[in-house]
Image: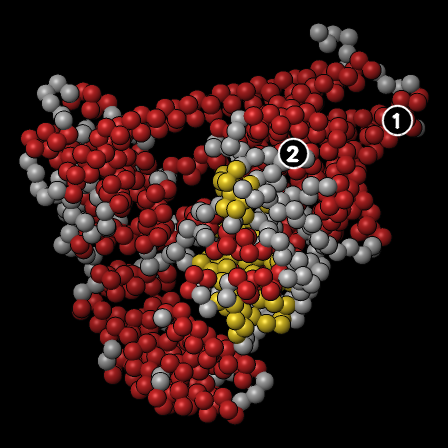
Amino acid sequence: MLNNILFFYGFLVFFYSMTLIVLYVVLLIMAYREANYNQRWDKTYVRNTVGTSPFTIGVSIVAGAYNEENTIVENVRSLLSQHYSTFEVVIVNDGSTDDTLQNMIEYFDLVEIPYDYVYKVYCKPFRRLFKSTNPLYERLTVVDKENGGTKADAINGGLNVIQYPYFINTDADCLLSKDAIYQCIFPVLLDERVIAVSGIMSMSNGFQVEEGEIFAYQPSKRLFPLFQDLEYKRSFLIGKMGWSRINAMTNVSGGYGLFKTDVVIASGGYSYDSFAEDMDMLWRMIAYCCDFGKPYKVVQIPHTCCWTEGPATFHTLRRQRRRWGRGLIQLMVKHRGLAFRRRYKRLGLITIPYEFFFEFLAPLIEITGIAVIFYLLFTGGINWIGFLVLFLAIYLFSILLSGFIITYDYIQGGSYDKLGSYFKLLLAAMLEPFLYHPLITLFSLIGYGGYLVGARAVWGDMQHRGASKK
Amino acid sequence: MFAGLSWQIHVAYFIVTSSILAMLILGVIFARRVHRRRKKEKRQREVCKQHKESIRQIMQSGELGEAEIRTRLGLHNGDYRKFRKDAPHFLQILVNLRIEASEAAYIPNLVKLSTLLGVRELAENNLLKGRDVFETLQALTMLQLPVTEGKLANYVNHKNREIRMMSRLMFMISSTSDPYKYLLDELNDSPSHLKRMLLHYILGWKQSQGMQMPSFIPLIEKTPRDATAAFLIDEITFYGTDEERQATRHFLSTDNPLCKTAVIRKAPLFDDDDTYRRLRDLYPHQPEEIKRAILHSLAARRADEHTAFFRQCYHDSFSRETKEVALRCLYISEGTGRREFEMIRQNSKGEERTLMDKIDSMELLNTLLKL
């Protein structure tokens, strides 16, 4: 009986892993085609047209800030320096207990404005609203509210005051490229069906930053951010770009994404109790469009628009990934009614099944696989030559995939200044399957467990070190 | 090599090998594309360094003879072939310089320049042979450089919507017989913000060159799409005749909310009593968005004359947003309107008081920022 179970399990894992490999290659090809699709447009021409047109679409940038006193001024300045004609920046001070708000008030000459706050979407109580008396910062609005415990609540707090039909959801600690708005609005200009646009995010750990400007693009000296950088590149350049080709995007990252305001509000805004609020929001937006027969499109653009500081320590990484794991299982439970239903088009027939089988189940299959290996080890059931040969094949594939991504990133203009920086990434790619991936799997499983036992979890403090000064 | 191993190993290696091969092929295709792009960019920089300044001066000059242009370019007999090879790069230089100039700029030497540089020949060959069609059409549109209508015939009804759009925009620039033949079809087909922006840009250029504008009213009446009609009404403001602007008032009684809003927004341009009276009469029977548009229009130029109306709207409205607009209109009325605003403020409390304080603070802040 046990032998039959092991035999069946072996076949399952074999087909699962082979399907995953083929899927990655298919996504890679689709990603390549998608990346080339919009390259034909002359960006100078479009920029000039957009910059001088009376029909330019306004964009609001909404960013939540919680205890960011070290970096808030620098980051808000970065947000305000966008090269776009019609935009505003709304910073939501989410009940910070440090000098985040005070630093902004002092630097940006903010004054409190009486404001009749309307709760178009739910959030914790609003306290005050600030505007600047300095013409340099007239685009800035600061909303002060009670802490909601989650980023979703902070973003909802900002959604209730924005004035433009599209908004960018980002974190206050993210550094945006100067043309981030333009890059993200471009797909919207081409196609009115677009309801969300995802820009590529990269790690800013190790960068040299002065007054919101990046001066040196270099990788982190610590391993965890390197691993995450690689992970982000694979996710954006292969996964999301590929899914975007067939309008089956799985997620628009909460760190940087452009959304259509009325669709977000019609979908109820961000879920304050979700730990994967970005994915949850996107799925609800798509479900809303499907339920009401509205055409929709979600797009990934092949440009790096945003740099974020990733968790640099074991502790913060664990907290983040536990939250993501919890968020994923929460999503699966919450949206199980959408899966495999034609009514929800690609979301129901492709995106959710993919997320379920290849993202959600992956840690469970891996941990079971490890247990089976140990069992076979002790019972002498392993064909070592076959095992090593198979291991070599999969490892080689993963290295080459990462190598392809690193080369692609370098050739496209690169995240880093120096070629040597990419060798660090390549080294990280070689170590990742042994050092990083098992940790992520473990943290995800802990997250699943946390959800199942109903353990309380909060976002906590990311312990930003701030990118180093020039 | 794997003869003694199980079939799973064979399959795994087949899949992994195929995947690696697919990645390598993709890598080669990608590297080749990048190599070509970098080579092109390098040559572009060299050509820019040699010729951009002289081309800029020719474009900024008054009308010059062909011989003079040739001299300024340093183009002597026998150099034609060399120049023709760099035609794609000259095309890019012309486009960049054209974008630097304002949209209304008339460049008398553009046609001669593009012929001498081989740009015109390149563009026409590309269209004839179906090579880099989109990029060529885009460049020609940016330059506003006309081509013969026949060369566009293959593309004005092309299955690719971007090529179709660009070729129809190009048709508007090039055609002397019926330049707006495809205008309505294009607006109704796969609408996009960028399309409207590009169209607006081209109409602006055509008007600056004294070319004929389309007849907007028949197009508005013919289109089944509300958004297209609203866009055309907006365009009348910029490029329509006085008769057409007057004729848009007829759309105040339309059932199309987008058209109605577009006309209401344009009402301050008419600035006559009859239009304002019609807006006030229209107000009670409209959805809130249109009511707010009416209030904004009435306040734009003659706020002082409508203070009683604003006050009434404020008291009658159940919509918070409409109340806010009505109050703001009262506030900016100065004189009577401001006094009315203050009287209402003194008697209000709670959320309404906060709303009025907000309006006061925001208007003061806006005034301060303008100083």
Image x and y of residue B105, in percent: 18, 49
Image x and y of residue B294, in percent: 37, 77
Quadrant of the image containing the N terminus of chain B: top right
Which chain is disc 2 placed on? Answer: A
Q: Quadrant of residue A353?
A: top right
Say left or right for A130 vs A385.
left
> Residue at coordinates 19% horizontally, 43% vertically from top-left?
B174
Disc 2 to disc 1: CB gap under 8 Å: no
Mark 1 = which residue? A374
Q: Is residue B186 visible?
A: no
Number of callouts in the render? 2
> Residue at coordinates 83% horizontally, 33% vertically from top-left?
A368
Q: Amino acid at mark 1?
A: Phe
Q: Quadrant of residue B267?
A: bottom left
Alpha carbon separation for disc pair 2 and 1: 35 Å
Quadrant of the image containing the C terminus of chain B: bottom left
Image x and y of residue A78, in percent: 50, 51
Q: Is residue A324 visible?
A: yes
Image x and y of residue A111, in percent: 52, 71
Q: Is residue B182 above or below residue B238?
A: above
Residue B300 numbered mark, or none:
none
Say left or right for A462 vs A116.
right
> Residue at coordinates 84% horizontally, 16% vertically from top-left?
A383
Residue A221 numbered mark, or none:
2
Q: Amino acid at mark 2?
A: Lys
Q: Which element type, helix, strand or loop, lies under badge 2? A: loop
Q: Earlier in the sequence, mark 2 or mark 1?
A: 2
